[in-house]
Image (cartoon, helix red, strand yellow):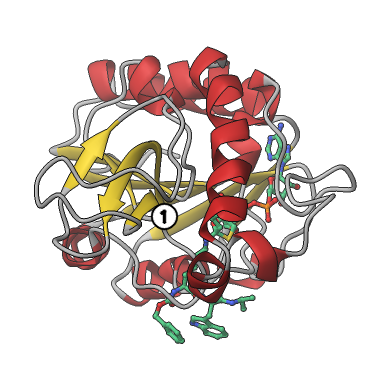
Amino acid sequence: MTRLYKNIFILTGAGISAESGLSTFRSENGLWNNHRVEDVATIEAYYRNQDFVHQFYNDMRPELFAAKPNPAHLAITKLQKEYPADNISVVTQNVDTLHEKAGNNNVYHIHGQINQIVCMHCGHVFETWGDITSEDSCPKCGTTAMLKPNIVFFGESLLYMDVVDRLLSKCDLFISVGTSGVIYPAAGFVQIAKAYGADTFEFNMETTSNNYLFDKHIYGPAGTTLPQFVDELIKAAK
Ligand code: BJW
């Protein structure tokens, strides 16, 4: 690990927040354990039964509001402060705000944020940690029953993809932390980074679906493995 990296792309998934006590999606007691994905995380479900979908995310908000960052999030803050790269960006699939709470910079929530609401009529996005129902109206255009959690459901386009494309084309180190690599297009980012010549490292507890695309696999809890890796990177740059 002697190479000095200039542009680092960090992709994170639910696994980075596991040690903060948040459920991942595809584990045995996963986030959707008591629900069918089709009922809570598709745009069709939202239009079919808005209040059911709102209730699911209303119930999730207090836990995510209270959650605290763990050593993996804090390691990214250290990397951004102490490593002499031109750019270190965090592209997260997570809807929690633990990267921000840890003080990470350049964070892009490609699957949205639990504390944001979007008006499907006018596109206005606003923040709240409170509950939303189908009776609420948009604070900008006044339309009722068109508010949706600003979370990217299956069949919807991802956010910040223009930025992501630019970052992928420039990165020389691609790091994936705590994602199973099954949801596209995020699962395909590593392939793009590799095609542009980046070194590709994966941090996970177990083998993932797209693991053959990574040059190096670091197995174990990210709260332990990521701080160690960050210390090695910083040491190698001195
Ligand atoms: C640890 C750990 C520790 C645990 N330390 N590690 C190409 C091919 C096939 C299908 C498609 C395709 N392109 C698009 C699609 C369709 C679809 C898709 O991907 N389907 C799949 C089922 C194949 N994608 C979409 O619809 C996307 N939109 C899109 O592409 O728009 C254009 C388009 C539209 C229509 C057709 C074609 C193109 C949108 C995807 C939106 C995903 N949204 C969700 C739900 C949000 C709602 C909610 O929050 O309830 O986002 S899905 C869910 O999965 C959530 C997550 O962000 C996402 C990824 O999950 P993640 O983070 O990887 O979590 P897990 O649980 O899977 O994994 C955790 C990992 O951590 C595990 O590996 C553990 O081992 C590890 N771990 N503890 C380190 N301590």
**Quadrant in the rendering for residue 225:** top right
Q: Is residue 6 above or below residue 214?
A: above
Identify the residue at horizontal 38%, vertical 16% (top origin): 101
Specify whether 115 is left or right of 200.
Answer: left
Residue 68 seen in this snapshot: no
Residue 139 seen in this snapshot: yes
Whole-percent x, y for residue 158 in the image: 34, 66
Whole-percent x, y for residue 74 in the image: 45, 16
Instruction: State whether label 1 is within 8 Å of ligand 1.
Output: yes
Mark 1, other Cα within 10 Å: few <14 / some 14–19 / many ≥20: many
Specify whether 163 is left or right of 97.
Answer: left
Q: Is residue 36 above or below residue 21?
A: below
Q: Quadrant of the C terminus?
A: top left
**Residue at which label 1 appears:** 111
Specify whether 68 is left or right of 98.
Answer: right
| Quadrant position of ligand 1 | bottom right
Given the image, on which type of amino acid does mark 1 rest?
His
Circle 1 — which element? loop
Q: Is residue 221 above or below residue 71?
A: below
Q: Nearer the viewer, residue 99 or 122?
A: 122
Whole-percent x, y for residue 177 in the image: 56, 43
